[in-house]
Image (cartoon, rainbow, N blue to C red):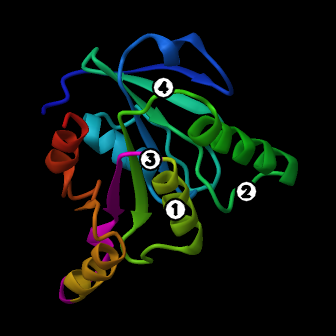
């Protein structure tokens, strides 16, 4: 699939009629500062569609993007550490879990993004287990593969694929555009 158009629609913090308009929804989730915005920007070939920041926890609402006028890419706030007051962090986590596990919205796929160098963290595994338990169709993106020495890349990827045996793992680099086409194709399957 080629992404020809991608536009920011709106940011929301709760229920919204857009989630019920019949267009498929693809969710992007990952720890704070794992590079979700960079993945979205490289996937859509737009440098500033999703705002990226070096500050963990910048995304504090559910950001909705319309892709090829046919489906929504939904960027959720990161889980784990965020540089924000505890009350704000708690509100974000409650919104996140409500949206993913309590709302009755139907998601086509959930793209779980993790750092390929770090590998799956306790927070990543907790999120994965919850997604799996709730029956979500999960794709794993091992982001930032360009940060790993070439001699160590296969070893890092094997550790990740061993953990997620039954799920698609896509090695990805927004900077080097590795995995962009593969992820775009997975979103339409």
Disc 2 is placed on an element classified as: loop
Q: Residue at x 30, y 33 (%)?
A: 46
Residue 67 spot, x, y in % from top left: 30, 23
Decide: marks 1, 4 in contact (CB < 8 A)?
A: no
Q: What is the distance, in whole Å, between disc 2 and disc 4 at their CAs?
A: 23 Å
Could you say which is closer to the camera, residue 188 or residue 9?
A: 188
Segment colored magenta:
135-151
Q: Residue at x 46, y 33 (%)?
A: 74
Query: In the picture, residue 50 is in which quadrant?
Result: top left
Q: What is the distance, in whole Å, between disc 2 and disc 1 at their CAs?
A: 25 Å
- Counting other residues with Cα less than 10 Å from the Cα at mark 3, is it few (<14), some (14-19), or many (20 or more)? few
Q: To which residue does mark 3 refer?
A: 135
Q: To which residue does mark 4 refer?
A: 64
Drawn side of residue 48 relative to residue 71, left or right: right
User: Reading the chain from its start, which is encountered first: label 2 or label 4?
Assistant: 4
Q: Quadrant of the C terminus?
A: top left
Tell me the tag on residue 165: none
Decide: marks 3, 2 in contact (CB < 8 A)?
A: no
Q: Is residue 19 magenta?
A: no
Q: Nearer the viewer, mark 3 or mark 2?
A: 3
Q: To which residue does mark 1 refer?
A: 129
Tell me the tag on residue 83: 2
């Amino acid at each position: 699939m080629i992404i020809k158009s991608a536009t920011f629609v709106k940011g929301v913090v709760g229920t919204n009629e857009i989630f019920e308009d019949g267009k498929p929804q693809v969710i992007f989730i990952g720890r704070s500062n794992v590079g979700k915005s960079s993945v979205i920007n490289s996937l859509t070939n737009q440098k500033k569609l999703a705002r990226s920041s070096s500050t963990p926890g910048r995304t504090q609402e559910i950001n909705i993007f319309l892709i090829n006028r046919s489906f929504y890419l939904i960027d959720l706030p990161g889980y784990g550490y965020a540089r924000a007051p505890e009350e704000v962090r708690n509100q974000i986590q409650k919104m996140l879990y409500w949206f993913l596990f309590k709302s009755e919205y139907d998601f086509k796929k959930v793209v779980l993004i993790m750092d390929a160098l770090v590998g799956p963290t306790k927070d990543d595994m907790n999120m994965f287990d919850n997604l799996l338990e709730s029956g979500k169709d999960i794709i794993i993106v091992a982001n930032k593969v360009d940060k790993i020495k070439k001699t160590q890349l296969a070893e890092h990827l094997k550790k990740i694929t061993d953990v997620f045996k039954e799920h698609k793992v896509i090695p990805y680099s927004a900077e080097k555009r590795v995995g962009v086409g593969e992820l775009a194709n997975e979103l339409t399957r």
